[in-house]
Image (spheres, rainbow, N blue to C red):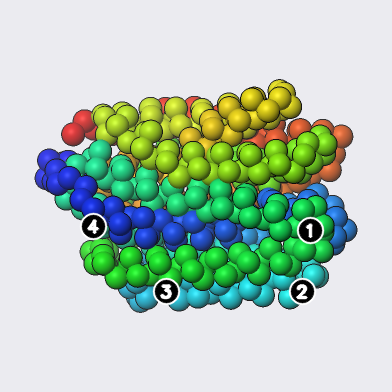
Amino acid sequence: MVDETVAGSRRVDVRVMLVAIGLSLAAATSLGFARFAYSLLLPTMRTALHWSYFAAGAMNTANAIGYLGGALLVTRISDRFGNRRSFVVSGAGMVVSLALTPVNAHLVPLLGLRIISGFCGAVIFVVGSSLAQQAARGLSRSGAAVILGVYFGGAGLGTAVSGAIIPAIHLGIGTLWRVDWSILAIITLLAMTGAVLASLQVGDPPVRTAQERHLGHYRPLLPALIAYGLFGFGYLAFLTFQVALMSHQGLASSRVVISYVIFGMVAAISGFVWFRPLAGHKPGLVAASIYLSGAIGASLYLLSKALWVEMVAAMLFGLALMSCSTAFGVVTRVVLPPSLQTGAMGVATVAIAVGQSLGPLVTGQVADSHFGLAGAIGVGATFIGLAAITSLFQRTQAA
């Protein structure tokens, strides 16, 4: 365990906060623009391209498979080329993959581009989290939780921006999905430019020794890793089909915007909600509470079509969407030395990517069955609940 008194107790200053905000644009890119935004496009793309729900889910599964590949290789890539170089090249790959998506309407090329964007997204996300950990070095546990919360909250900001922009563009017109992807590519270019500039203010973390590359070093994080994987299955299953469910229920497109903007914005600021509990001695218990919030939020979409229920559901889900990553980062910071933290987030990203690979594919089959879209959402919520239960078994020593 890393003693927090040794790690330091420096307060968060303006420069560190600005660096965290800049790096958060990478999380906005890798998850908010490249992944979560697809759920907003799924109904119109499915209609325009005549896809089944299984094919539509396969698009997110392809992205998750690429994400898994990036997660498996990110520590080797960063060890060899350094964090900042890996960051820049992966950001460029992300922009190109999004820019090429509207060029071809055939499923196979689109799946290939989703794999590439997933791979680049994993490298961006993991390396960005490592840089955020570096920016937080010397801070107290609560200060580090704020910085990590700001970084991971960037994905929520990206989700909110996508939720506000995409429905306004296509207005239900299926052929304009190409315009959506083009605009996402432009936004991604701008966001990654800001993230790269922020990365220049942070040094690379210590390089792992040969002994530290053994996976056995991450055994103390096993419950947290399993919970992270279960959440990956559940949350991406929910996000993949939530918009389709609302459209199937005949709800106005403005209701979709409300959901995405609320849980995106709540996710962006959720780090400020959870940082004090995470600074305590039981971050595993706090992580369980975070997952439970997500499970309840996802379930509420099945219980009522009322606007106020939707808003509460979006807020609860938003509180969990990226704070689970913050909680994992805090646990990692407590349990492992700095040289292992990039590797730990890489292993965690593998765990969540496995869940993300299976979630949309399995629940796509559920959606095509007599259980329908509600069944798919229910399965997703159940897996998020299982993540909450598993997280209760994570142990950390008191600082």
The answer to which quarter of the image holds residue 111 is bottom right
Mark 1 to mark 3 CA distance (whole Å): 30 Å
Left or right, 14 with reference to 48: left
Q: Residue at x 30, y 59 (%)?
A: 19
Residue 321 left/right relative to 199 = right
- According to the picture, the residue beneath numbered tag 2 turns out to be 104
Mark found first going from the N terminus, 3 or 4: 4
Secondary structure under badge 1?
A: helix
Circle 2 residues within 10 Å: few <14, some 14–19, many ≥20: few
Disc 1 residue type (three-letter):
Met
Whether residue 130 is situated above or below residue 107 in the rendered picture: above
Q: What mark, if any, has residue 45 been given in the picture?
A: 1
Q: CA distance from mark 2 to mark 1?
A: 12 Å
Q: Looking at the image, is mark 4 or mark 1 earlier in the sequence? A: 4
How far apart, in angstroms, are the residues tagged by discs 4 and 1?
42 Å
Question: What type is the residue that disc 3 sits on?
Answer: Val
Q: Which residue is mark 3?
A: 88
| Residues packed near mark 4 inside 10 Å, few (<14), some (14 to 19) or many (20 plus) | few
For mark 4, what is the residue?
15
Distance from label 3 to label 2 (Cα)?
A: 26 Å
Instruction: Name the residue: 14% across, 43% down.
Output: 9
User: Which of disc 2 and disc 3 is earlier in sequence?
Assistant: 3
Pick the residue in front: 373 or 21. Answer: 21
- What type is the residue that disc 4 sits on? Arg
